[in-house]
Amino acid sequence: MPAGEAFTTAQRREIDRARHIAAAGSGYEYAVYVGPVEGEPRAFAERVHAATERPDETVTVVIDPGARCLEIVTGAAVRRHLPDADCALVAMNMQTAFAAGDLVGGIVRGVQQLGDHARHPATLHTEQHA
């Protein structure tokens, strides 16, 4: 989680825990950047996303509280299970929490929701019968 030095150790742990739980449930990675956005927010978020270890399998959340900016970028593999409409819904929920002054709670719940939406459906029958 680059930037975000204003978070306490406990808050950083809470956000990291949400990221790890979302990753375990969905099989994708979750990156969170909280800090100043340089230039156009979407382009900045895409650069942050591209710098992750596995961008095709990562969901990146970029938040600039000062500029009241939130961007969610999904990798190519993630998009098959996490469509833009689901990301928009999660973003609205996060913005509601942010507006109420709950930055950490909004991030934690948002990452959890992204992970829930990105879960792969269980495959019941993988064997082929002749």
Image: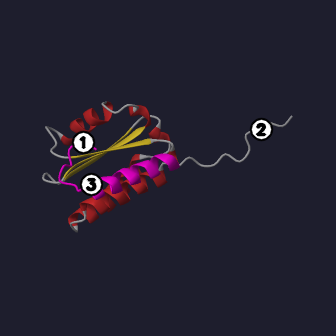
Identify the residue under disc 2: 127
Identify the residue under disc 3: 9
Is 115 included in the stretch rendered in magenta?
no
Distance in Å between CA atoms under marks 3 and 1:
14 Å
Q: Quadrant of the C terminus?
A: top right
Labels in figure, total: 3
Residue at 77% x, 38% y is 127
Answer with mark 1 or mark 2, whichever residue precedes in sequence.
1
Crowding near pointer 3: few (<14 within 10 Å), some, many (20+)?
A: few
Is 24 included in the stretch rendered in magenta?
yes
Q: Nearer the viewer, residue 62 or 22?
A: 22
Q: Quadrant of residue 101?
A: bottom left
Crowding near pointer 1: few (<14 within 10 Å), some, many (20+)?
A: few
Mark 1: amino acid: Pro
The residue segment tinted magenta is: 1-25
Mark 3: amino acid: Thr
SS of the residue under disc 1: loop
Residue at 27% x, 54% y is 9
Distance in Å between CA atoms under marks 2 and 3:
47 Å
Q: Quadrant of the N terminus?
A: top left
Q: Quadrant of residue 44?
A: top left
The answer to whether the residues at label 2 and label 3 have Cβ atoms under 8 Å apart is no
Compared across the picture, whether 68 is left or right of 1 comes to left
Residue at 27% x, 65% y is 97
Q: Quadrant of residue 37?
A: top left
Compared across the picture, whether 124 is left or right of 104 comes to right
Q: Main secondary structure of the magenta part?
A: helix
Mark 2: amino acid: Glu
Identify the residue under disc 1: 2
